[in-house]
Image: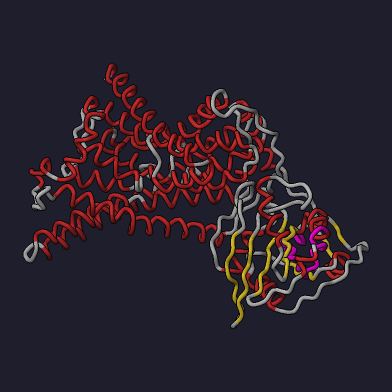
Amino acid sequence: MAENNKRVVGKRKIVLAGNPNAGKTTLFNALTGRNEKVGNWHGVTVESVCATARLKNETAEIIDVPGIYSLKNHDAEENAAAETLKEGGYSLIVVVVEAEKLKRGLRLIRELKSFGVPIVAFINLYADFLKRGGELNAEEFGKSAGVEVICGEAINERDVRRLKEAIFGETPILRATNEPFGYVAPKKRSKTLEKIVSGKFTALPVFVLVMLFCFWFAFGNLSPIAAISEAISRLLNDFIANRVYDSLAPRNLFLARLVSEGVIGGLSGVAEFIPQICALSFCLDFLDQSGYLSRISALTDGALKVFSLSGKSVYSLSCGFGCTAVSAVTANGIDDRNVRLRAVLSMPFISCSARTPVYLFIAKAAFEEYSFLVICAVYLLSLVAPLVHSLLLSKTVAKGKPEPLIEEIAELKFPGLRPLLKSLLKTFKEFIIRLSTVVFCVSLAVWLGANVSPNVELLTQREIDRSVLARLGSVFAFAFKPMGFDWRMPAALLSGIFAKESVVSSFLLLYPEGLRLAINQGLALVVFCYFYTPCLTALSAIRKTIGFKYALISAVYQLLVALSAAYAIYYFTGIFI
């Protein structure tokens, strides 16, 4: 490994390594100002991530590698870390070690010593370690391991600055004495909460109650979040849009309609759901960073084997509630190819957050005050449908049984408010970016297509059947006519290929009188939107994970399943309604 000893010229490169769940990514975010996903289980970091850290006038490239236990025997997720470490080209390794699990981290440090570069050991979660009676002689530990030692918290600015000073300083290569050092393990945490959330008879009821609270908080009629959403809708539609129209109409009617209807009107239907999407994201991040979802991963491993999945799939599948594209990327950390294939092909059956505004819009039109129950049913279906689909795949195109889950279970803890707020801000930014780019462009295109004829003539609302969009929608109208829809429905749903949120803005533009639905039509439409083809971003991520052939098959297959399920629901419920 002599090639790893080369002196790096130019910007210094620092590798951030450590065992899973040691707080490595939290430290990476603190050093670089980034906001990478932080979690307590497999799949959070599936590839090396680079960013720049600064101290005064100096900069350094920080490389965050996936958590790794050993360089000798590692799985697919850890392989990215091992390869980065073996490639060399860096001037320092920072090893993040959880104070309570110091001896396990020491084994990794001793392996890394063979690369012949300076090492700084950051002993994380040190305050809680001391609080529970733990003791560590940091100086003796540093001499024994042959590393510089910094004890602190990854979320503490002062401790992060001390680490930065070590990174930008001259850290020598120290010789390890391998002598004993002073260490007293801390007292174990109380197991009362753990017994409740992980108990044989209490785990499932607790999980159901927790998820019901999350959904009520985000979507319930009496939730404060629902009131905020209603206020945003009134502000955009009743105040801003009307005032803009009244101001521009006397000067330019086309521009007045374009801005008030095409831009503000189209975006308002999506913007009003921002608080609800952020609320659900905050709840899921809280459960993730508290270590609760890590326990669910372990507890469900046995049950998932029945459906030919493993506990390792839980993280990837749960990411699907946020974004199918992210979910597909995290699946790279699943070792077994067939399990990975089954997981990725089942991900579109999990309702992503972008579809939620569509369900709410349809549910309010068809079911009014019962819209919350529709959302609960959709998310319940999202828990069942992927499992059933995986089981079917295991009997056909992706046969094989998953390997047993070998994974560390994170400790239950109350997550820090700052990381939660940073994650919430990231979700908000991503939603705003999509709203101001993809949804904006699609809304504008839909409005123009619905209000301009093939001869480039501005049409009134009554003349919409002569529009460019009417021509396009008519091509697909035959598929929705049996359910009582005209060309406007396929035209609106087609916009969801670019971004699912765009469907809501398209509904608002194409149905200015309001979307009026019978109950069986509403159910059929919700089912179609649940099943149909993911957006282009998600399909691209699926292609990168399992290949172009399967991504194409998934796109066509999801569309056929969506149409079949919608017809079945429409005609079946029509019998009773």
- Is the C terminus in the top left, top right, bottom left or bottom right quadrant? top left
Q: Residue at x 67, y 34 (%)?
A: 199
Q: Which of 32/82 is in front?
A: 82
Instruction: Residue 442: tell me if it is visible.
Output: yes
Residue 417: x and y, percent? 55, 59
Q: Residue furthest top?
A: 575
Based on the displayed image, in which of its 4 quarters is residue 116 positioned? bottom right
Q: Which of 82/176 is in front?
A: 82
Based on the displayed image, in which of its 4 quarters is residue 197 positioned? top right
Image side of residue 547 versus residue 577, left or right: right
Q: Is residue 128 magenta-colored?
A: yes
Q: Is residue 408 above or below residue 52?
A: above
Q: Is residue 396 above or below residue 383?
A: above
Q: Residue at x 28, y 51 (%)?
A: 442
Q: Is residue 41 above or below residue 164?
A: above
Q: Residue furthest left?
A: 250
Image side of residue 447 versus residue 438, left or right: left
Q: Is residue 345 magenta-colored?
A: no
Q: Identify the magenta region.
A: 111-131
Instruction: Residue 197: tell me if it is visible.
Output: no
How many numbered markers are drawn? 0
Q: Residue at x 70, y 34 (%)?
A: 404
Q: Is residue 17 above or below residue 499?
A: below
- Is the N terminus in the top left, top right, bottom left or bottom right quadrant? bottom right
Residue 83: x and y, percent? 69, 55
Q: Residue at x 91, y 63 (%)?
A: 178
Residue 106: x and y, percent? 82, 58
| Colouring chosen for the image of the structure | secondary structure
Residue 570: x and y, percent? 29, 24
Q: Which of 519/115 is in front?
A: 115
Image side of residue 258 versus residue 308, left or right: left
